[in-house]
Image (spheres, helix red, strand yellow):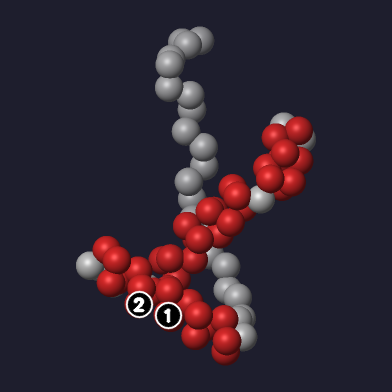
Amino acid sequence: MLELKLAKLPDRTPVKLAITVTPDLHQMLQQYATLYAEAYGREELIAELIPPMLVAFLESDRAFTRRRTASR
């Protein structure tokens, strides 16, 4: 078997999730999307902003990161 420097890419098939949020959270997400557009000059749908927001949150949770690393 060949040993390439680049490892096999992980599965990148999107998984669609449907969630329900409170009106307050929806308003905050709309406000965030507005600030994002002001900061970067580009409007993005809230649904497009949520996945990177979740990744940033999970990666910043030290206890989660430690536990996840230990379980590998």
Q: Are marks 2 and 1 in contact (CB under 8 Å)?
A: yes
Q: Residues within 10 Å of mark 1 (few under 14, many from 20)?
A: few
- Asked whether residue 44 is in view, the answer is no
For the point 70% across and 35% down, which residue is it? Answer: 69
Secondary structure beneath dot 1 equals helix
Marker disc for residue 23? none
For the point 61% across and 81% down, which residue is it? Answer: 20
Left or right: residue 37 versus residue 53 is: left
Quadrant position of the C terminus in the picture? top right
Marker disc for residue 34? 2
| Residue 33 on image: x %, y % | 39, 74
| Residue 3 on image: x %, y % | 47, 11
Circle 1 residue: 31
In this rendering, the answer to whether 23 lies above or below 49 is: below
| Residue 11 on image: x %, y % | 52, 42
Specify the amino acid type for callout 2.
Thr
